[in-house]
Image (cartoon, rainbow, N blue to C red):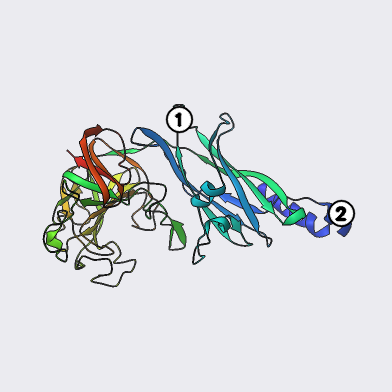
Amino acid sequence: MRTACGLALAAFAVVLPRSSAAQAQLPPFVEMRVPKAPTVVMGRGTAMLVHELHVTNFQAAPLTITRLEVLGGEADDRVLLALQDSTLARALARPGITPPPPLPERARVNGGLRAVVFLWIPLDTRGAPARLRHRLTISQGSGDSVRTHVIEGGRTSVTRDVAVIGPPLRGSGWLTANGPDAQTGHRRALIPVEGTAAIAQRFAIDYVQMDTNGRRFTGDSLRNESYYAHGTDAIAVADGIVAAVKDSIPENIPGPASRAVPITLETVAGNFVILDIGQGRYAFYAHLIPGSLRVRVGDRVRKGQVLGLVGNSGNSTEPHLHFHLMDGTSPLGSEGIPYAHERFDLVGTCRRMFAECARSAAEPRRGEIPLANMVIAFP
């Protein structure tokens, strides 16, 4: 029925007399799409919904997004989030436009182009609705001819089935660099692989180990062995089957520009292990030391079993473990999914990555995902 209506509208537009066409008022041809439905996730005592809305202008005339509201489904009409002005601009990204437009111009979408709204929605005590819908306010034209339209779309279900997993590491002093947050690079790494754009790193964390003074190494900063994280055990977060491995990529010399091999889709993760933990979920461990992998494809492993040793291979500036959960076996072409750890202890925070870090008394956290710039300890 939907196709038949579309064809009828097209035919109607073609045969409409010119005088009637001038009076016709059709809605803007705008697509609103949610590529990955959100799952309720807990972080630091707050339930959150994390997802994206893709807005594509299917007409020649430019439009400007002036407001976005995220609402509950038909039976739950509350407004969960409203963005406009600077808050809307900061949530927007414009794929393929380099350099990115300045904030005041980011909401203007020319014909045939797309805007992506990165949404991070804290929930109140009423929790999450079963479904979400999105309401856009857009303007077209200029001066006295500006027209405002309000359109709804982008409906999606909300899921609550979060994987509860063990730790990927042992010990204390682990900084959750580039961890879950509305603005981190991982959160916004929308990458097309094999014809589909996905955010595999939506909830990814770069685990860097620090001492109580915030130092990440002792001695020569150009030696991987100087870093506290180097050589530590990367362990299975759940029982599972090894789905993929890569080995033999040499380690980098620590530093922002040093790479031992050219960075491609094949080498970006360095030496890695992908563990199938069931129910369409895969745990990804990247940047391991070459020759340190303890498992092969097809091996069955138990939670807590050592998979390999933390290193500095691939697209990495220093020894650390990149960890995320995803819904497929492509490290960058799958969709990142949230999870909850059985337990970790919050032992400090940094105001910025590697900066203004302060330790605190251990605060046990259960059933949560670590958020960006926490310093945590695993049991």
> Disc 1 or disc 2, which is closer to the eye?
1
Residue 206: image x %, image y %? 27, 53
Q: Residue at x 26, y 52 (%)?
A: 354
Distance Cα–Cα, label 1 vs label 2: 49 Å
How many numbered circles does the render carry? 2
Considering every residue shown, the one lying at the far top of the view is 126
Q: Which mark is residue 160?
A: none
Above or below, 238 relative to 329: above
Q: Is residue 100 visible?
A: yes
- Residue type at tag 2: Ser
> In the visual, does 66 lie left or right of 236?
right
Q: Please report whichever mark, 1 or 2, sits nearer to the chain's N-terminal start.
A: 2
- Which quarter of the picture shows residue 348? top left
Secondary structure type for disc 2:
helix
Q: Is residue 238 visible?
A: no
Residue 285: image x %, image y %? 25, 53
Q: Residue at x 14, y 52 (%)?
A: 232
Q: Which mark is residue 124?
A: 1
Considering every residue shown, the one lying at the far front of the view is 356
Residue 257: image x %, image y %? 28, 69
- Residue type at tag 1: Asp
Q: Which mark is residue 20?
A: 2
> In the visual, does 220 lie left or right of 318?
left
Secondary structure type for disc 1:
loop
